[in-house]
Amino acid sequence: MVILKRPLRLILVAFLACLPLISFANQEVDAEHGKEADTHEAVAESHHEGAHAEPTDVKSKIKAFINHHVLDSHDFSLTQDDETGESWGFPLPVILWDNGLQVFSSAKFHHGKEVAESNGNYYAINHHDGKIYKTDASGTITENEETGHPENFRPIDFSITKTVLSIIVAAILMFFLFTSLAKSYAKNGGIAKGAGRIFEPLVLYVRDEIAIPNIGVKHYKRYMSYLLTIFFFVLFLNIFGLTPLGINATGNFTVTFSLALLTFLITNLTANKNYWGHIFWMPGVPKPMRIILAPIELLGVFIKPFSLMIRLYANIFAGHIVLMSILGLMFIFKSWIGSSLSFGLAFVLSILEILVAFLQAYIFTMLSALYFGAAVEEHHHEEGHH
């Protein structure tokens, strides 16, 4: 095999594949530990009216961990001790708008187990959705009996969460990487050096295999900056999701919605009259049929970015769920045969997740290029003769 001739590549792939396994392995799940009441969490849960009891069996604890893993969070929890209930990590800034700006560290929540006070206001994190709600000094969150949703006031949240921080890091990383790549081109006569050599083939691939074939030589340069940005942005966030930090940015509905919205706006704001003519008065079709097809075509304008959003969200979200579930089987089987099989399958899926990270970035970029190409497609003369 070619890869065996380059041991560094093999080690790198194995390391990346093991990263998701580390994030789950740090959380010890044991039936005996599940029987012991967690003092800190029990106190916090007692503050929440109608809150569900803490899971005590292995399956429930695994399910709770998976649900927590895919949710956004106001801090990073790297490890947790089931016996003491203590977590180790680092807090993030909480920024709320509640009759003025409320800024404090998420350390006040103690990983969601205590009530945080700021300027005489009290706030608590709801364990079911990870959102911050305004409470009294006891931290009581009242849930609606019919819907199960909290009835407490929810302040406007501008906090730097794990997802927000990962987006900022990805943006900064892209800025420095491609600034250095551009400078190396200028200094070395169009030849990339340093880290730019790794990303130059990907840049050329986006240009030659995605932008030009789908948009055309005449118009592709108008969209190259966006296509490159969206490709590497989605790729970096997908890779971050494979680390032990529990980041799930592209598995977050609001993130994929924002990305799809950008594609939607660029497509329709840069479209030519031929694009709109095909939607509202399709050439080559009998006039009565045009009246029927126009609403359908207009609906398709909104369905395209919606499918773009759902495709990225569903694939990344489902990948996290499946991988964590298979890892959970290691603790359920409690035998060297079953646990070994679960670990092996999880390792293979982790390698597959690396491929999915690149594949989803490619698909999102390629479909965006397809929409841009349809928006700027020139009028064909033969259509005018129908």
Image (tube, rainbow, N blue to C red):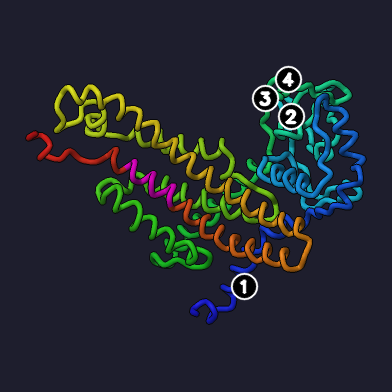
Density class for disc 4 (Cα within 10 Å; few <14, some 14-19, many ≥20) is: few
Q: Quadrant of residue 375?
A: top left
Range shown magenta: 363-372
**SS type, badge 4:** loop
Q: Are marks 2 and 1 in contact (CB under 8 Å)?
A: no
Label 2 – label 1 distance at C-alpha: 42 Å
Amino acid carrying mark 3 in the image: Ile
Name the residue beneath numbered marker 1. 11
Query: Horizontal and vertical percent for residue 107?
Result: 82, 39
Q: Of callouts 3 and 4, which one flags the residue occurring earlier in the amino acid sequence?
A: 4
Q: Nearer the viewer, mark 1 or mark 3?
A: 1
Label 3 – label 4 distance at C-alpha: 21 Å
How many numbered discs? Answer: 4
Q: Residue at x 26, y 29 (%)?
A: 279
Label 4 – label 1 distance at C-alpha: 52 Å
Query: Horizontal and vertical percent for residue 153?
Result: 73, 19
Amino acid carrying mark 2 in the image: Ile
**SS type, badge 3:** strand
Density class for disc 3 (Cα within 10 Å; few <14, some 14-19, many ≥20) is: few
Q: Nearer the viewer, mark 4 or mark 2?
A: 4
Label 2 – label 3 distance at C-alpha: 9 Å
| The one of 76 and 148 positioned closer to us in this rendering | 148
Q: Of callouts 2 and 3, which one flags the residue occurring earlier in the amino acid sequence?
A: 2
Q: Nearer the viewer, mark 2 or mark 3?
A: 2
**SS type, badge 1:** helix
Task: Say if 131 sits above or below 245 in the image.
Answer: above
Query: Horizontal and vertical percent for residue 14?
Result: 62, 69
Amino acid carrying mark 4 in the image: Asn
Name the residue beneath numbered marker 3. 156
Name the residue beneath numbered marker 2. 132
Disc sitting over residue 144 in the figure:
4
